Every structure is written in C-alpha cells, then in structure tokens.
C-alpha cells in the first residue's frame, strides 16, 4: 500500500514533500504494472476460450429452428441477415419488433453474414467476441481501481476479474450482451471519474454518446444516468465550475445517439416506442402465476404456444398492451404479493438465493453453491464499499450510485444472476479494496494519467494523502 500517484507535476509539487517528488524507478515500475495488465488480459481471454471449447455445441441444437442460438437475439439477427429487417424474434413470422435494442442483434447478423446462420463457426465467433470483450474489461477495471484506490487494489482487481467465475461463465457460455454491457458501464464509470475535473465539451459529448450506445445495447443502463451524471455535475459545482453546459452537451449527445432508433420504431409501429416495448411482458413473466422459479415461462411466448399464438394474432404492440393490462391488474389486486416478490428479487440479485423447494433445486442443481459464492462475494464487496466511504466519499460514491441504480428495473420485473454481470467489475474493485486496504485516506486523481483543467483546485493535501 501507500503508493503515491501523481495526476500531474503540479499536483505532485502541491501534495508531496520535496524528498518525495522524484523517483528514478518510475518508468521501470510503470512497465512492470503494465505487464500485469497485459498478462491479465491474455490470461482472461485464454481461460474463456478454453471454456468455449467445451460448451459451444450446446448452441447448435436444431429444436425450434435453432432457438438455443441466441434466443430472441439470434432470431432477429437471422431475420436481418436474410433481408427481412429487424423482425421475427421467435421461430415463426411475427413481423417487425422492438423487443430488443439494435446493437447486439446487428452484431450477430454480421457474424451470420460472414460465417453462416447457426453454424459452428458462427457460434464460435459470437462466443469468442464475448470472451474478448470480457477480457478487455480488465483494462478499465485496472485504470478505475488504480485511480480510486491505488496500485495494489488495481492489480488485485484485474487478476480477480481474469479468474472471476461469473465473468468466465457469462462470456464463454452466453450469446447475450451482458459482457459488452459490463465493458461499457465500466468505461462510463472510468470516464465519469475524469469528468469530475474537466468541462471540455468534446469529452462530455463523447460521454453522452457512449451512454447512448450503451442504451442501444440495453436500456437498463439509463437508470444510472441521473445518479452518476448528477454526481459528476455536483463535483464540478463544488469545484466552482459551470456544470450546466457540459451536462446539456452530454444529454444532447445521448439523445442524438438514440433518436434514430426511436424514429425507426415510430415509423414502423406508428406509435412512440422508447427503445424497447417489452417491459410489461417481463413484469408478467416475473410475477403472474405461482411458479417456483424466478421465471414463469408459462406466461411467455417462448415457453407457451398459446401465448405465442396470441402474440402473432394481436401483433407485438397489441400483445404488449395486453401484458400491461394484466401486469397492472395483478399489482393493483395483489400489492402485498408483488412487494414480497420484489423483495425476493432484491435478495436474489445480491445473494443468488431464491428457494429451497425441491422442484426448484431440481431445475437449478448448482444453486446452493452459487448462493454461497454470490453471498460471500457480495459481503466482501460491500465491506470494501464501507471502507471506501469511510476513507473518501468522493472516491466511493460513484460505485455506490451505480450499484444502487443499475438493478432497479430487475427488482420490478424478474432477476437472473447474469443480469448483475454489468456491475460485477465495480464489485470486483471494491472486493479487492476490502482485501488490501489499510483505512488510509484516498487521493482522487484524474483518470488516464492526463492533466485536469488548470483552474480546477487540486485535492486537499492533508497529512497522509496517499493512495491506499
């Protein structure tokens, strides 16, 4: 511990004693730390690709027209690749859809165009892409942890991510976008830490555009925007800077990024659709009926042929309107049950525990082991957050806000362990800090090793202002 990191020569001169201002071993030290990062990325990629070699055949099942190959994502990608546009999320012709946002289906459609639909090569390409994305997440994890908590935490966090079971499993054994969202959300958290010290509008515009791209991957990330964006603006205000123009620039860039997709939805459905239209269907899946599972497939078109027939007959928007009516009727008629199930989803998100009923455990035979691991890791990460908040609220608050905001929609609809993968990088950083921290104050520095705006006040130079 106790490594000292300088955002700039000026900051070094303000916060360090004269005897600590020079260190001839810095280039050698930086090189060693960069090698840690490179080896962590390569190790993470290799581990994930090894797992792909064992599991990829599970996605080549022919049933329901290759339904296991990406589920709705794969069906939409197939439709795009074969010239039918963004449509048909199931194995029958149902027409244009807004059940998914465009980024990942279009990426998968490129894979289909290059390697063929539902082929072995396509499966390996999609899974390898997710593995690569997960391995590259080591980079923002390292930078974020180093800037917030110091080098020992950064090294611990990056190696933890390389071997982290959830990161390996949900990249190597999933054709969903969770790994991509984890990378994007970690990048956004890293950029936000830098924007606390700058009002350069091009950077704020890039911040907003990246939020828009993440929203076009999954709109769930938008729940974080008011919390994390509000915190960054508050920090600018505390530094005596005008936050209104940067914030407006970021909001404009975000809207510009998502506007074409929203315009597409309006032109196709002749009705406003905000990014996706399946929110109320997900509420029904997680609440209607008395299924022992956190997912009731009997009320979902993919699990019930009668529901699929209704989907086709009513059309997508008509079906979603019916789902909205059913969901609201259930919530109004059974508020206590809905609140209880929402509470269970909160518990499940953070512990992995859902039920001890035999019929549930038959479906999820590894659930008890998963509950032990998930709960233990959550406790460790929350310990790190508690220590961080005591050391430096400014360093810890962005993590707390992301952990608070991101899962909110899943508490209302239904939850899966894979849904928390986008916030796992933050949890890994906090858990690593819990292990290596020594309760020393934390020096907040700009990210990327660049100088902040010259008229931003430097951090308070208190006794012992070192990076823990």
Image (cartoon, grey):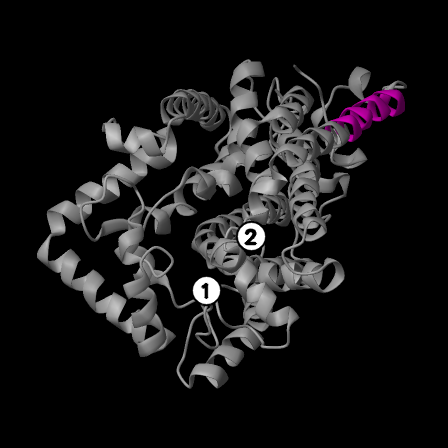
Taking depth in this image into account, of 417 and 433 the one nearest to the observer is: 417
Residue lying farthest front? 62
Judged left or right of residue 172, residue 26 is: right
- Secondary element at tag 2: loop
Quadrant of res 32: top right
Determine whether 88 is above or below 271 in the image. Answer: above
Taking depth in this image into account, of 96 and 19 the one nearest to the observer is: 96
Quadrant of res 383: top left
Residue 201 at x, y percent in the picture: 67, 63
Q: On the image, numbered disc 2 is attached to which residue?
A: 69
Residue 86 at x, y percent in the picture: 55, 72
Judged left or right of residue 215, residue 291 is: left
Taking depth in this image into account, of 286 and 465 the one nearest to the observer is: 286
Q: Would residue 116 be seen by someone viewing this image from the given angle? A: yes
C-alpha gap between disc 1 and disc 2: 12 Å
Q: Residues within 10 Å of mark 2 (few under 14, many from 20)?
A: many
Q: On the image, numbered disc 1 is attached to which residue?
A: 90
- Residue drawn at x 47%, y 59% is 219
Q: Residues within 10 Å of mark 1 (few under 14, many from 20)?
A: many
Residue 419 at x, y percent in the picture: 45, 43
- Residue drawn at x 77%, y 36% is 10
Taking depth in this image into account, of 65 and 32 the one nearest to the observer is: 65
Which stretch appears magenta? Answer: 26-40
Quarter of the rendering occupied by the C terminus: top right
Quarter of the rendering occupied by the N terminus: top right
């Amino acid at each position: 511990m106790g490594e000292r990191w300088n955002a700039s020569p000026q900051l070094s001169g303000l916060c360090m004693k004269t005897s600590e201002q020079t260190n001839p071993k810095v280039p050698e030290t930086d090189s060693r730390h960069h090698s840690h990062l490179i080896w962590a990325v390569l190790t993470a990629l290799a581990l994930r690709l090894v797992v792909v070699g064992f599991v990829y055949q599970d996605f080549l099942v022919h049933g329901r027209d290759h339904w296991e190959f990406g589920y709705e994502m794969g069906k939409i990608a197939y439709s795009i690749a074969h010239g039918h546009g963004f449509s048909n999320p199931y194995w029958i012709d149902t027409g244009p859809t807004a059940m998914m946002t465009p980024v990942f289906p279009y990426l998968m459609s490129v894979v289909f165009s290059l390697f063929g639909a539902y082929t072995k090569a396509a499966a390996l390409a999609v899974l390898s892409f997710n593995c690569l994305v997960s391995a590259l997440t080591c980079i923002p994890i390292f930078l974020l942890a180093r800037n917030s908590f110091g080098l020992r935490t950064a090294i611990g966090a990056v190696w933890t991510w390389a071997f982290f079971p959830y990161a390996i499993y949900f990249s190597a054994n999933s054709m969903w976008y969770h790994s991509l969202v984890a990378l994007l959300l970690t990048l956004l958290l890293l950029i936000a830490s830098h924007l606390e010290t700058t009002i350069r509008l091009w950077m704020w515009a890039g911040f907003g555009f990246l939020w828009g791209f993440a929203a076009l991957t999954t709109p769930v990330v938008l729940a974080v925007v008011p919390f994390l964006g509000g915190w960054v603006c508050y920090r600018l205000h505390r530094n005596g800077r005008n936050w209104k123009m940067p914030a407006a620039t970021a909001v404009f860039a975000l809207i510009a990024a998502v506007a074409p997709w929203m315009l597409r939805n309006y032109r196709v459905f002749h009705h406003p659709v905000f990014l996706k239209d399946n929110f109320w269907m997900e509420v029904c899946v997680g609440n209607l009926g008395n299924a022992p599972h956190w997912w009731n497939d009997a009320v979902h078109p993919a699990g019930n042929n009668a529901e699929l027939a209704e989907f086709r007959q009513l059309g997508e928007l008509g079906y979603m309107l019916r789902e909205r009516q059913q969901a609201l009727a259930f919530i109004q008629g059974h508020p206590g049950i809905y609140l209880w199930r929402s509470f269970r989803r909160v518990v499940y998100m953070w512990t992995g525990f859902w039920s001890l009923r035999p019929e549930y455990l038959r479906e999820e035979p590894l659930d008890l082991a998963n509950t032990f691991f998930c709960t233990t890791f959550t406790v460790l990460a929350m310990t790190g957050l508690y220590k961080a908040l005591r050391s430096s609220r400014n360093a810890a608050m962005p993590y707390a806000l992301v952990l608070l905001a991101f899962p909110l929609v899943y508490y209302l609809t239904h939850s899966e362990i894979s849904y928390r993968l986008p916030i796992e990088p933050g949890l890994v950083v906090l858990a690593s800090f819990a292990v290596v921290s020594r309760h020393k104050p934390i020096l907040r520095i700009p990210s990327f090793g660049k100088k902040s705006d010259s008229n931003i006040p430097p951090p308070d130079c208190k006794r012992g202002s070192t990076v823990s």
